[in-house]
Amino acid sequence: MTALTLSTSSAATTRVDAIVIGIAKSADGADTPVLAPGAETVDQAFGGRLATVLETLGASGGEGEVTKLPAPEGFKAPVVLAVGLGTAPEGLADGAGFAPETLRRAAGAAARALTGTGKAAFALPVADSTESVAAVGEGALLGAYAFTAYQGKEGARAKGGKGSKGGKGGRAAGKGAKTPDDGSAPLAEITLLGAKPRDKAHKAAVARAAVLADEVARARDLINTPPNDLTPAVFAAQALAAAKEHGLTAEVWDEKALAKGGFGGILGVGQGSQNPPRLVRIAYTPSKAKRTLALVGKGITYDSGGISLKPAGHNETMKCDMSGAAAVFAAVVAAARLGLSVGVTGWLALAENMPSGSAIRPGDVLSMYSGKTVEVLNTDAEGRLVLADALTRACEESPDAVVDVATLTGAMVLALGNRTFGIMSNDDAFRAELHGTAEEAGEQSWPMPLPAELRKGMDSPVADLANMGERMGGGLVAGLFLKEFVAEGTRWGHLDIAGPAFNESGPFGYTPKGGTGSAVRTLVRLAERTADGELD
């Protein structure tokens, strides 16, 4: 993990490989970018002409824009990197600040631009704002990520293995593990200038940022690991190892225990694969906790679609179909590492959805853990089947709230795009709280309805319900299906992260290409708010 420290030193005297400053677009439309607070020392060294120099180099201050230039004479660092913050807020000259998410994204973009660099000092606008210190630290650490487990000689030995290297890439960087020597290793050390090393609030803010970034990296690593190395059994083993490391309790149901327990949804989805399914319960249970959260994650380690095979061009990224389980796993560990006063139990519903002679067929009927029967009309609507069993089991422990996370439907991507996840709930107030929590965490989301009239489309002539309904509103239909397996009176939320979980385009802000760790920060913030009594 990239090291993060605080310093009150001057940008001129800090011995690093690069100094990062912020610039913004002028609110009045002027071509010359506006220097953000924190850049004063660099500007003075340029004789007050830094903004003009940056304009000459083509810099505008647009969000995520990166411009490098030689550091002025007398600086210990050889390079200055100016990162765009977007349009300057009104009152910037009077010290008014930027939104936390703006700072996160800018810090992340700068950290990505410094891949292959040893040390950098970030002189972004933090002033005395603990929130700004947290945002810059979090964004820089999230941006300083690389998945390197399969690169170089070490990676070559990992390929084709049985999971021994899975989940080690991003978090291994900076911990003594071998990394590629081609300049692709992430930024190794970050110093936040203007933050106070002895300020308890600042220290706590960066400590939290480090835990969040580390656990987001855990989720990203799992998502990026190839499916031949991350089977349900390997995923479950990693959960057991993390539980032992962080003092959590963990239990794994293998295929025999699942059969004995009547988990027909998980077993049905996994029966076509030579890699049998697993259900994992991993729990953080502090003694003084008065509230409990249950988090349920879809963990399809590879999704071929089963007998309802996915069309060409839709299979290549299906290692990411366990992103929900990765987010839940990482969030539980983060809650433990942060010492939150709330019980958090994660349920990881793990299976591989493959076509074979033993796979479930369209027309089969599954007997679920809840006792309900489900007619399978489409084997590619498998995530809701494994989640249904896990949701029923999670509700048996009577948590104060249950939230499931899943890359569930392509319909949600069509509705909200690639960067926003949908939120559904059986409680309008809780749905609003989840949306607000995601916004606080810096993750894009949008509340979605559960129209009662769509439920009829899942009626089955041979079972209690079918796993498919009307084509239009498919993401909402999936939510209505899951609602059927939530215990009466249990407050429940559903996050469909199909869009933002895996970034197939170019990196942006603090978001890399590949696995993103979507929903981890929202779940951790939800746990914090629950611990603080904000969600009563």
Image (spheres, rainbow, N blue to C red):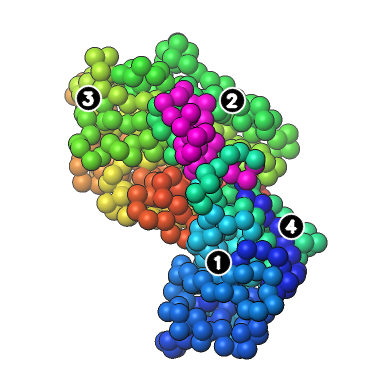
Residue for badge 2: 240
Which circle marks residue 419 in the picture?
none
User: Can you give x and y, in whole percent of width and height, for residue 453 in the image?
Assistant: 25, 44
Q: Could you tell which of marks 1 and 4 lies nearer the N-terminus?
A: 1
Residue drawn at x 21%, y 29% as measured from the top left: 308
Residue for badge 3: 307
Local packing at callout 4 (Cα closer than 10 Å; few below 14, some 14-19, many 20+) is some
Q: Are the residues flagged by discs 3 and 4 in contact, CB closer than 8 Å?
A: no
Q: Is residue 477 left or right of residue 510?
A: left
Q: Amino acid at mark 3?
A: Ile
In this view, 431 is above or below 353: below
Residue drawn at x 51%, y 84% as measured from the top left: 53
Residue 267 seen by the camera: no
User: SS for tag 2?
Assistant: helix
User: SS for tag 1?
Assistant: helix
Q: Could you tell which of marks 1 and 2 lies nearer the N-terminus?
A: 1
Q: Amino acid at mark 1?
A: Leu
Q: Which segment did they paint magenta?
A: 147-175
Q: Amino acid at mark 4?
A: Lys
Q: CA distance from mark 2 to mark 4?
A: 31 Å
Specify the principal SS of the magenta part.
loop
Residue for badge 4: 203
Q: Are the residues flagged by discs 1 and 2 in contact, CB closer than 8 Å?
A: no
Which circle marks residue 103 in the picture?
1
Residue 204 found in image quarter: bottom right
Q: Could you tell which of marks 3 and 4 lies nearer the N-terminus?
A: 4
In this view, 433 is above or below 401: below
